[in-house]
Image (spheres, rainbow, N blue to C red):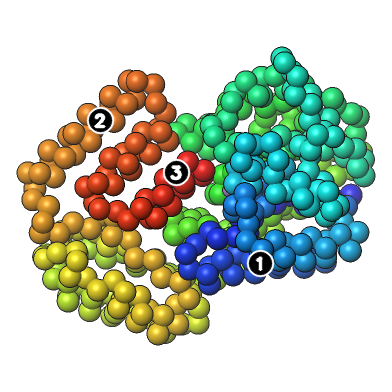
Amino acid sequence: MKFIHLGDTHIGKVYKDETRNDDIKLAFSYFVNKAIEIKPDFIVHSGDLFNEGFPRIEDLIFVTDQLMKIKNAGIKLFAIPGSHDVGYGEENSIIDIFDKSDLLTNLNSTKYLKIEDNEIILKGEKYKNAFIAGIKGKRTRAQEDLFKKLKVEMQDAWIKIFLFHHTISELGEEFKDIDINDLPKGFDYYAAGHWHGHKDGIKYEKGIINYPGSLEYCDAFEIENYNERGFYLIDYDEEGIKNIEYINIPTKQKEIIYLNVDNLKASEIFNQIILRLNKNEGKLLIIKLEGRMNGFKSELDIERIKEICKENGYSYVNINTSKLQDSKSSEKIEIKERRIDEIEEKYLAKKGFNEKEIKIAKLLMSASEENKDSERLLDELMKEYDN
Ligand SMILES: [Mn+2]
């Protein structure tokens, strides 16, 4: 018998650039076709099916169509709400609409989850000799309480699967939002979501934890830093897990251009970038500018550069100037700023804020200095908050 594990599909308005949102949908429909071809006994989705709690109608229609295909192929889909689609008030989720229309099973609907004073009782579902249970993600920071109060009504099965949507310190101490030991024990396969990288084979008790990562890159950072995108296919029999395979989702090719602009004028930077471009058919392009340019950032015609990139065939262009300095920022002020920055960081750390919270605070503090537009700031804040 076999099942598929995927997560973080983020259908919706992830990018301002709609071509990327279409790429994300393309990855999902590729997945659905592939899954129908594989014909597993069932599929588990570890959260963030949608990018927002209130998706656009077009996104709802798209997902409905795709889930219908899975259903018509006779494949059952089990899911938990992720931090993005958990819904406001964290009571109901967009996932419930699909649960009620029988296109998926929300493992956290009232049928499976009972919240009492001191206990959270979690029932799972026995299906095709597998026991499947899971706990939803949270929009706010995970309450360790929730996991400590969790009582799973375990059932005997060939394989026991637990779905969750949180990060653990095995991904890096700074990213952790729950302690690995708070996860319920006794499962064979922990289908994890929330972490958009791809990390498999984390050992826990007698089981393993797998993070498939996002099905498509969800921002410029992911394009630059992550390589494989995909999902897991797990074979099992009466003795448990037999084999696990990571199956790739084809994404667009990417190109990253790193450029040191020390002492270059805006026109020279412009020319250097243009020289590095290649004719192509739809590549994703990230341009990272570093160093201190001669002149001012405002002299760089970012929009014109993007236009020329598109003319060369690139389907998506991101120009990262966060490490670009110009003649405005004098050395002395910079050193002073850096020291204040460090002091603020140490102060906040002493106050018991975690790294994520410090990052958000720093973003807010930098907002007035850099004159960030409110939408971009909100985007960055949400990213820090959610991912
Ligand atoms: Mn996610």
Q: Secondary structure at mark 1?
A: helix
For the residues labelled 2 and 3, the Cα–Cα distance comes to: 18 Å
Tags 3 and 1 in contact by the CB under 8 Å rule? no
Asked whether 109 or 283 is in front, the reply is 109
Q: Earlier in the sequence, mark 2 or mark 1?
A: 1
Q: Earlier in the sequence, mark 2 or mark 3?
A: 2
3 or 1: mark nearer the eye:
1
Tags 2 and 1 in contact by the CB under 8 Å rule? no
Q: Is mark 3 within 8 Å of ligand 1?
A: no
Residue on which the image places disc 3: 384
Q: Secondary structure at mark 2?
A: helix
Q: Earlier in the sequence, mark 3 or mark 1?
A: 1
Q: Quadrant of residue 116?
A: top right
Q: Position of residue 377 (x, y in %)?
A: 37, 50
Mark 3 crowd level (few <14, some 14–19, many ≥20, 10 Å Cα): some
Residue on which the image places disc 1: 58
Residue on which the image places disc 2: 344
Q: Is mark 2 within 8 Å of ligand 1?
A: no
For the residues labelled 2 and 1, the Cα–Cα distance comes to: 44 Å
Tags 2 and 3 in contact by the CB under 8 Å rule? no
**Is any part of residue 195 visible from this angle?**
yes
Vertical placement of 299 versus 128: above or below?
below
For the residues labelled 3 and 1, the Cα–Cα distance comes to: 27 Å
> Looking at numbered disc 3 in the image, what kind of residue is underneath it?
Glu
> Looking at numbered disc 2 in the image, what kind of residue is underneath it?
Glu
Q: Residue at x 22, y 63 (%)?
A: 260
Q: Residue at x 62, y 61 (%)?
A: 56
Q: Quadrant of residue 363?
A: top left
Asked whether 139 or 233 is in front, the reply is 139
